[in-house]
Image (spheres, grey):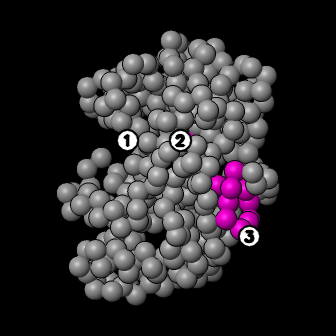
């Protein structure tokens, strides 16, 4: 078994740490506050993620370094560059494989199912920040300074999901209460969603299999992509709740809310993802590593069970 350092203890980092510890690995979770899951095999360490020297010390002797951190949404441009630099430097100094949890912002607006060979054509600030991070990692990998990979998924949902996702309080709660669901995008456009347990499993595979290194991958994601309306109706059926009415929040209303709420204001940069078909193709990862995504029905049932259990971490 190896030493694995997980940076970030949110909806992905915490789950990944528990998965790795359950596999018998020695796991260190790094957050600014020293928070994280409490379980056998997991050590929690406080550190400033942008402090390259501190992160290098923590990563010493590590086999894999996972970047699962996520700065505040409206501060990506300021916070990501120093953190990404520190993570890359720590991987280079320690010899650990660098596995980064990415996203689909890097592709910009697309008109077909997304595959890993798409150009990184984002024009928005957040997409360009993430594209630069991957270009820097890939350059270091090709120069032989690190071994690196990036895994990209669509919107996350499932047990342990953040309250910030639109599948939590704004989706499950109204459906179970028999109330309408108000969505911040088109309700009739198919939109891929990625199940959190599948995210953690894919990251663990990428850290241990050399075939994953030196290129990006899409995290196994269930097909077909459903519309938000279809997702809501199916969840209601599984939960035994009334069929919900699903309506769209007008963009003009989102912009008005964004004047006072940074998170909503920043969402407008990626609103194209929610107003047209947004479909992720994860065939490459699935066929290369023999890992299939969890079916949508199974994922929704497990999410419902988690919700009824009091939403444990």
- Residue in the foreground of this view, choosing between 74 and 211: 211
| Element on which disc 3 rests | loop
Res 111 label: 3
Residue 64: percent from left, percent from top:
52, 24
What residue is disc 1 on? 15
What residue is disc 2 on? 289
**Marks 2 & 1, CB-CB < 8 Å contact:** no
Mark 3 or mark 1, earlier in chain: 1
Q: Is residue 71 visible?
A: no
| Element on which disc 1 rests | helix
Residue 7: percent from left, percent from top:
49, 31
Q: Is residue 184 above or below residue 53?
A: below
Q: Would residue 194 be found to the left or right of residue 141 on screen?
A: left
Q: CA distance from mark 2 to mark 1?
A: 20 Å
Mark in front: 3 vs 2: 2
Q: CA distance from mark 3 to mark 2?
A: 27 Å
Q: Which residues are magenta?
A: 101-116
Q: Is residue 288 above or below residue 300?
A: above
Q: Would residue 174 be found to the left or right of residue 195 on screen?
A: left
């Amino acid at each position: 078994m190896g030493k694995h350092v997980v940076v970030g203890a949110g909806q992905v980092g915490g789950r990944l740490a528990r998965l790795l510890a359950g596999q018998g690995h020695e796991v260190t979770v790094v957050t600014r506050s020293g928070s994280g899951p409490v379980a056998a095999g997991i050590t929690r360490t406080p550190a400033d993620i942008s402090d390259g020297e501190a992160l290098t010390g923590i990563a010493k002797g590590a086999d894999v370094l996972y970047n699962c951190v996520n700065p505040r949404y409206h501060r990506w441009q300021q916070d990501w560059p120093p953190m990404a630099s520190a993570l890359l430097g720590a991987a280079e100094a320690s010899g650990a494989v660098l596995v980064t949890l990415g996203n689909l912002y890097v592709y910009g607006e697309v008109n077909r199912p997304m595959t890993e060979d798409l150009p990184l054509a984002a024009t928005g600030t957040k997409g360009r920040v993430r594209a630069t991070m991957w270009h820097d990692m890939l350059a270091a990998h090709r120069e032989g300074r690190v071994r690196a990979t990036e895994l990209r998924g669509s919107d996350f949902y499932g047990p342990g999901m953040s309250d910030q996702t639109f599948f939590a309080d704004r989706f499950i709660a109204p459906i179970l209460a028999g109330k309408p669901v108000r969505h911040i995008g088109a309700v009739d456009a198919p939109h891929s969603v990625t199940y959190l347990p599948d995210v953690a499993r894919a990251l663990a595979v990428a850290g241990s299999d050399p075939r994953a290194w030196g290129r990006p991958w899409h995290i196994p994601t269930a097909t077909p992509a459903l519309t938000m309306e279809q997702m809501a109706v199916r969840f209601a059926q599984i939960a035994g709740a009334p069929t919900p009415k699903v309506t769209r929040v007008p963009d003009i209303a989102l912009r008005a809310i964004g004047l006072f709420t940074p998170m909503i204001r920043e969402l407008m940069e990626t609103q194209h993802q929610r107003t047209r078909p947004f479909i992720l193709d994860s065939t490459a990862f699935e066929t290369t590593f023999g890992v299939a995504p969890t079916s949508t029905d199974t994922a929704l049932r497990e999410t419902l069970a988690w919700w009824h259990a009091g939403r444990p971490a």
